[in-house]
Image (cartoon, rainbow, N blue to C red):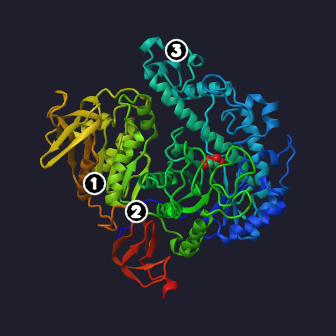
């Protein structure tokens, strides 16, 4: 089985009384007469729901008039849930300010980039930088914490809801200027680092600097994203400071993020949060792209490098695609187990029951408007029954990967500001590297470039476009200490200011590689790529590489194409002691990348936990020092058989220990390396 590598910490849940694996729902008691609550909670209990999130949009019920608070209904809702063995996450309601607030203080409303102030009626209409709004946000969070900070049934806090909308109001602009002043010290330093001689951009003072998120100097654009990141971080701190003094330390504080969303640097924002939690919604269709979703779970696990929560997921369908196709029967359960396989300790469905009116009437739910279960309720009930069986086995366990993919927001932003090749989507490119890794290594971490790389045998940085000297030094040390590093195209092209690295790509790692990029080419057709015993192609992007050290080898080169690329190196590698650095200068076709990945894994001595498992069966492993738990998810619409490397005990199904498992279509198996007491 897997070597035990301590790269992440287990267990997101800290509440002693909550089951280790939690099934939850988003519940909006404020939308229903109290007399109906017990009916709903009884049906939750029957589905093994042990968690509700409440409150995140209920400001107008908590503070109906300025400074007048009504938390009695929440006391009663929490107590009612507790009678059904359900614990609570409280959402601070700041994503939906009340009308009295926005009417009396219109300066708290966000302003779009083209100068239009938002209005009431939707949500997220506040300015994240508004000093006045933050005072109100602090006060409501503090009042909630005073009331519920020691409530034994409240396990944690969700700040706001899905941070997303930045604002260009006067507060935000002034803060951006102050932020720049703090970063650069003086205007001369900014002019130098931004190279503002270009287009007469030279500034005399910080107030002259435009506040834009598009069509601007790339340095400004990158700094705006960093400012937005720091502003969401301080937005969180504002509420954390209100909650902490009044709350038990066992109550965690988090917020719910959104997959690949790149509005801010999630690593920075998570510095001040206790656990990561994300909202797992998938593209429209009866099935889902499970490898993409796997990567998004790994991304969320990487924020705190420990287990996480799925704060929201869809009970079959959503309401915001053009056509909201429902997931095929069985796929909702398959998704829940995928989340757990990747390190989720809670899976919560949004939402329990449709509001009687409002913008989301069509969204998937567990109950219909009449309060009776809809068909997917049974499938989610099955998930609850599964969690009840498997919770004790999975308690304290987490995935342990020997390989990591680096996700870097600076680089993603920088490429998106200047794609140069329209189809060079940095997330798609990251996933091009993730897919074969997932298939062949099975357990993969997705981490920040600032994460410690200790314990990883192989690290792949798909498009580390912005590379600072400090980051390069870390990667160099990793290689020198025996690590195997693979850099994808466009890596090391930019410095911390989003300016060009004068030595060319990969910038400060060029001397380590003993090679560099002589020229890059955006492609509108494929280009052949060949090696000693290899044949494939590049698409979207191709870099002409140049060898600068006798120790550097050409792994692949281009075939005949635009003349410039003909016979030029496409992939270089250099051994450094026991480690190596490889530079892949093109977006390679899937088959070629698959075979290259196999060679990197072999060189780095990485072994899949279940070699030979069918490709449409997802293999997840969570473990601790005592045992390993294998979670197998059959994403295929046909049955599959999987051989295990040793005898394992079934956790969900009754049955004897075996070294082989059969899976129904969309079937799930959970297997323990230790004997499971229930099966004795
Ligand atoms: C988001 C929000 C929820 C709800 C769902 C609908 O995730 O956080 O309030 O609107 O989308 O899919």
* Label 3 residue SS: loop
Ligand 1 under 8 Å from disc 3 Cβ: no
Disc number lying in front (3 or 2) = 2
How far apart in space, not on screen, are marks 3 and 2 (Cα)? 59 Å
Query: Is 508 situated left or right of 121 in this image?
Result: left
Q: Specify the label residue 203 is tagged with.
A: 3
Residue at image coords 29%, 46%:
486
How far apart in space, not on screen, are marks 2 and 1 (Cα)? 39 Å
* Label 1 residue SS: loop
Which quadrant would residue 637 be assigned to in this image? bottom left
How far apart in space, not on screen, are marks 3 and 1 (Cα)? 47 Å
Observer-nearest of 557 and 464: 557
Which quadrant would residue 515 be assigned to in this image? top left
Q: Specify the label residue 482 is tagged with.
A: 1
Observer-nearest of 581 and 156: 156
Residue at image coords 42%, 14%:
198
| Location of residue 501 in the rendering, given as x and y in whole percent from the top left corner | 34, 29
Q: Specify the label residue 636 is tagged with.
A: 2
Label 3 with label 2: CB-CB less than 8 Å: no
Work out which residue is located at the far top of the displayed protein and give it: 200
Query: Is 646 situated left or right of 29 in this image?
Result: left
Observer-nearest of 639 and 655: 639
Q: Which of the image's four quarters has the N terminus?
A: bottom left
Q: Earlier in the sequence, mark 2 or mark 1?
A: 1
Query: Is 199 situated left or right of 609 in this image?
Result: right
| Location of residue 335 in the rendering, given as x and y in whole percent from the top left corner | 50, 60
Q: Earlier in the sequence, mark 3 or mark 1?
A: 3
């Amino acid at each position: 089985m897997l070597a035990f590598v301590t790269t992440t910490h287990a267990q997101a849940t800290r509440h002693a009384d909550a089951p280790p694996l939690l099934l939850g729902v988003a519940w909006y008691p404020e939308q229903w007469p109290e007399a109906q609550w017990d009916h709903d909670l009884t049906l939750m209990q029957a589905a093994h729901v042990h968690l509700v999130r409440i409150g995140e949009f209920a400001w107008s019920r908590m503070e109906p008039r300025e400074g007048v608070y009504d938390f009695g209904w929440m006391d009663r809702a929490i107590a009612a849930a507790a009678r059904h063995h359900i614990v609570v996450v409280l959402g601070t309601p700041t994503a939906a300010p009340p009308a009295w607030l926005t009417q009396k203080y219109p300066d708290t409303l966000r302003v779009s980039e083209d100068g239009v102030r938002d209005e009431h009626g939707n949500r997220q209409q506040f300015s994240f930088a508004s000093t006045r709004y933050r005072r109100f946000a602090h006060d409501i969070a503090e009042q909630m914490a005073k009331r519920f900070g020691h409530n034994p049934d409240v396990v944690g806090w969700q700040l706001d809801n899905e941070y997303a909308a930045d604002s260009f109001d006067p507060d935000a602009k002034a803060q951006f200027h102050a932020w720049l002043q703090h970063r650069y010290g003086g205007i001369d330093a900014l002019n130098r680092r931004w190279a503002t001689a270009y287009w007469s951009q030279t500034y005399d003072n910080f107030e002259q600097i435009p506040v834009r998120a598009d069509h601007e100097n790339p340095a400004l654009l990158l700094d705006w994203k960093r400012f937005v990141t720091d502003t969401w971080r301080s937005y969180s701190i504002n509420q954390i400071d209100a909650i902490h003094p009044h709350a038990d330390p066992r109550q965690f504080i988090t917020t719910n993020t959104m997959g690949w969303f790149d509005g801010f640097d999630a690593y920075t924002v998570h510095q001040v949060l206790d656990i990561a939690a994300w909202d797992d919604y998938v593209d429209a269709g009866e099935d889902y792209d499970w490898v993409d979703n796997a990567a998004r779970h790994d991304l969320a696990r990487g924020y705190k490098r420990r287990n996480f929560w799925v704060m929201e997921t869809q009970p079959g369908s959503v309401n915001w695609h053009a056509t909201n196709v429902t997931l095929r029967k069985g796929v909702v359960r398959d998704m829940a187990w995928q989340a757990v396989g990747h390190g989720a300790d809670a899976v919560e469905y949004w939402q329990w029951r449709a509001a009687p009116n409002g913008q989301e009437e069509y969204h998937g739910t567990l109950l219909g408007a009449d309060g009776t279960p809809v068909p997917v309720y049974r499938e989610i009930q099955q998930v609850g029954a599964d969690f009840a069986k498997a919770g004790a086995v999975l308690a304290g366990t987490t995935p342990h990967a020997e390989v990591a993919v680096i996700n870097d927001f600076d680089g993603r932003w920088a490429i998106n500001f200047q794609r140069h090749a329209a189809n060079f989507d940095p997330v798609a490119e990251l996933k091009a590297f993730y897919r074969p890794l997932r298939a062949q290594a099975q357990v993969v971490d997705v981490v920040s470039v600032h994460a410690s790389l200790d314990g990883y045998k192989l690290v792949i940085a798909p498009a580390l476009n912005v590379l600072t000297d400090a980051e390069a030094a870390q990667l160099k040390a990793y290689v020198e200490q025996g690590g195997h590093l693979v850099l994808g195209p466009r890596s090391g092209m930019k410095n911390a200011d989003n300016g060009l690295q004068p030595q060319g790509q990969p910038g400060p790692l060029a001397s380590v590689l003993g090679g560099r990029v002589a020229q890059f080419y955006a492609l509108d057709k494929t280009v052949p790529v060949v090696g000693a015993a290899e044949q494939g192609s590049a698409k979207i992007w191709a870099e002409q590489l140049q060898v600068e050290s006798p120790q550097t080898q050409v792994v692949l080169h281009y075939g005949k194409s635009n003349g410039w690329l003909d016979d030029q190196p496409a992939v270089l590698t250099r051994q450094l002691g026991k480690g190596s650095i490889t530079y892949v200068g093109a977006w390679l076709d899937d088959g070629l990348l698959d075979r290259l990945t196999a060679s990197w894994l072999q060189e780095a001595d990485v072994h899949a936990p279940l070699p030979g498992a069918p490709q449409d069966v997802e293999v997840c492993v969570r473990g601790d020092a005592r045992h390993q738990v294998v979670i197998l998810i059959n994403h295929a619409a046909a049955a599959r058989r999987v051989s295990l490397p040793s005898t394992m005990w079934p956790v969900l199904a009754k049955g004897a220990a075996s070294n082989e498992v059969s899976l129904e279509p969309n079937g799930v198996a959970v297997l323990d390396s230790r004997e499971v007491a229930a099966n004795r």
